[in-house]
Amino acid sequence: MLKRTLVKLSIFAIIPILISSWGFLAHKSLQQVSIYTLPEELGLFFYANQDYLVTHSIRPDVRRRDDKSEDPKHYLDMDADVFGPNYRTSIPHEFSAAIKKYSLDSLKNEGIVPWEVNRVYKRLVYSFQHQLKDSVLFYAADLGHYVADSHVPLHTTKNHDGQYTNQKGIHVLWESLVPEEFLRNYQFNEVPTVTYIKNPQDFIFQILLESHDMLPEVYKTELAIRAEMGEAKAFMEVERGGRKLQYYTKDFIKAYGNRLGSSIENRMLLASNRVASFWYSAWKDAGSPAWVMAVPEVSETVKKKYSSEKSVWVANNLVKENLLISLKTKSAE
């Protein structure tokens, strides 16, 4: 069952971004920033291929349009009935053990993102080890997407679009509409330094639990602002194709983002840190191969540009200097 795809058929169906994940703008932005936080011996290679990594950060979402097997790779409904009341501790981290306990069909129905992260991570390690440059870039782009998705609270619950709490549309509100509205003011230079992840499979479950713990505030804040503003000011009606559709108003989006403070921004920046940490850890697990510094695209010109652009990032001037790729391409999406 394509749960997250069904969100696109809700009252927010015409919004021109794919709402089943961090919006395209957020995915591209956080993936670009991830590159700056890497140590130079790996960061230069990723920076030399920055356009590819940023452009293809949204590829898993694009695949969902035609590949129905892609959908469950983006979430895990931890509170689904099949996992029982002790889901925080009872879901096996090993995929084979989880299949044995719940069945593969059940997992595909409730989501497999933590195991997809681990699968792609291992592919990335192998590609680093065997000097498969194109494969490194392919798996790094995909891995970044799945890790980022795991930081979204609404990717961890069966109530993923507020359908059980009369909050339809909250999914796109939290992960796309608010970042779209506030992203130009985000402190992109406040992403922590990368760290080595000793056990990627356990760590991605930790991330999902962090995200899940954010849900009460996500729901409560939306309900509180609706009560304060009233339905008439919270939503606007638009007619498309002969159908009347309901959208959050600009005032509501701003109010929701302001009430949550830096919550969404911090989650997005932490996702950027974790994406970089997964990339770095895969490279370390592959033996820290030096070939990434010897590829032709890591030229002296690229090295100078990399150093200059990192300085702009450190000063949090990516937007001001028109260097945030996502903002350059947003109008074309």
Image (cartoon, grey):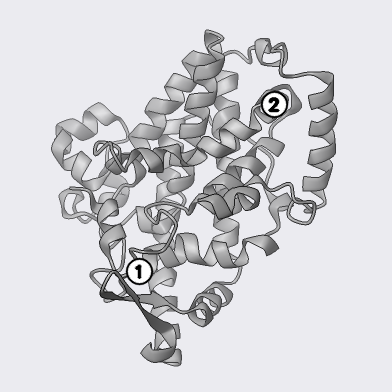
Q: Is residue 15 visible?
A: yes
Which residue sits at x=63%, y=41%?
Answer: 32
Picture quadrant of residue 180: bottom right
Numbered circle sitting on residue 323: none
Q: Is residue 277 visible?
A: no
Three-letter code for the amino acid on which mark 2 is drawn: Ala
Rendering coords of residue 182 (x, y %): 61, 66
How packed is label 1: few (under 14 Cα within 10 Å), some, or many (20 or more)? many
How packed is label 2: few (under 14 Cα within 10 Å), some, or many (20 or more)? many
Picture quadrant of residue 166: bottom left
Three-letter code for the amino acid on which mark 1 is drawn: Gly
Rendering coords of residue 328 (x, y %): 65, 49
Rendering coords of residue 228 (x, y %): 45, 91
Please tell me whether mark 1 sits on a helix, a strand or a loop. Answer: loop
Name the residue that disc number 1 marks. 169
Which residue sits at x=19%, y=45%?
Answer: 109
* Front-lying residue, 107 or 296: 296
Picture quadrant of residue 61: top left
Name the residue that disc number 2 marks. 48
Q: Residue furthest top?
A: 130
Q: Is residue 239 left or right of 150 when viewed as pictured?
A: left
Q: Is residue 133 left or right of 47 when viewed as pictured?
A: left
Q: Is residue 234 left or right of 255 when viewed as pictured?
A: left
Which residue sits at x=21%, y=54%?
Answer: 80
